[in-house]
């Protein structure tokens, strides 16, 4: 008898499973899948006076302009997503190079935008006497897609998103960046 009840429940659930596979995200793309992307971001990275980087004679804080290349993949799960992203960053002034990897999670916003938080590991190579260090990196940001700013007909579902984010290296720095993400 239990086998028949289980089979009946399974047959009754099949239509709802089939309709769940037909769902779409707010931007019209499939609700489940893989979305790779690459991008370029520019900004500034400024460390607090009392960080693990110590101090250099004549300098008060470690800071510099940065230019980052990023690559990653998002996995949409209906209205939310998870993902992973790597970065390679060239710095100026006191920062030579930065690179790292982080996980991302967030929600889709509007027609083609995203709101997200991230956490991962970052390596920072200083110059001009500043040491090299590695530690945790945390951040939050938004991506605004073409449909959200009235350009939906130009790129469709693939194309460009504008990203604005801020991150911190172990809560010892402030790292605002902005740039362009190309998703496909």
Image: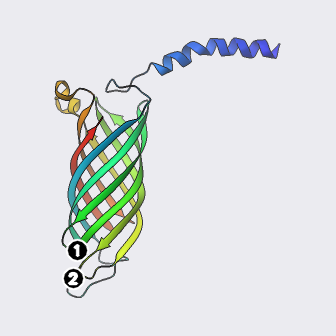
**Residue 127 spot, x, y in % from top left:** 25, 77
Q: Classify 11 as above or below 88.
A: above
**Residue 78 spot, x, y in % from top left:** 43, 29
Q: Which mark is residue 59?
A: 2
Q: Which residue is drawn at 20% across and 86% down?
A: 58
Label 1 neighbourhood size at 10 Å, few (<14), some (14-19), many (20+)? many
Q: Quadrant of the C terminus?
A: top left
Q: Residue at x 27, y 31 (%)?
A: 158
Q: Camera-side residue: 36 or 170?
A: 36
The residue identified by callout 1 is 94
Label 2 neighbourhood size at 10 Å, few (<14), some (14-19), many (20+)? few
Q: Classify 91 as above or below 103.
A: below
Quarter assignment of residue 74: top left
Q: Camera-side residue: 52 or 102?
A: 102
Instruction: Identify the residue at the far bottom of this view.
Output: 57
Element type at marker 1? loop
Question: Looking at the image, is mark 2 or mark 1 nearer the viewer?
Answer: 1
**Residue 100 spot, x, y in % from top left:** 37, 59
Q: In which quarter of the image is the N terminus?
A: top right
Element type at marker 2? loop
Q: Could you give the CA–CA distance between mark 2 and mark 1, rounded to whole angstroms?
A: 10 Å
Q: Is residue 97 left or right of residue 107?
A: left
For marks 2 and 1, the one nearer the N-term is 2
Quarter assignment of residue 83: top left
- C-beta proximity under 8 Å, tags 2 and 1: yes
Q: Is residue 17 left or right of residue 77?
A: right
Q: Classify 176 as above or below 159.
A: below
């Amino acid at each position: 008898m239990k086998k028949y009840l289980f089979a009946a429940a399974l047959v009754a659930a099949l239509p709802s499973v089939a309709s769940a596979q037909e769902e779409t995200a707010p931007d019209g793309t499939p609700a489940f899948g893989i979305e790779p992307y690459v991008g370029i971001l520019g900004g500034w990275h400024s460390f607090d006076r009392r960080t693990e980087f110590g101090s250099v004679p004549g300098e008060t804080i470690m800071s510099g302009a940065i230019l980052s290349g990023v690559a990653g993949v998002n996995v949409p799960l209906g209205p939310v997503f998870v993902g992973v992203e790597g970065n390679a960053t060239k710095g100026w002034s006191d920062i030579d190079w930065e690179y790292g990897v982080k996980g991302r999670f967030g929600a889709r916003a509007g027609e083609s935008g995203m709101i997200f938080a991230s956490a991962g590991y970052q390596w920072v190579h200083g110059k001009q006497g500043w040491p090299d260090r590695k530690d945790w990196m945390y951040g939050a940001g938004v991506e605004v897609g073409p449909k959200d700013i009235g350009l939906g007909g130009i790129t469709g579902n693939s194309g460009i998103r504008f990203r604005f984010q801020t991150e911190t290296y172990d809560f010892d720095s402030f790292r605002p960046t902005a740039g362009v993400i190309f998703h496909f």
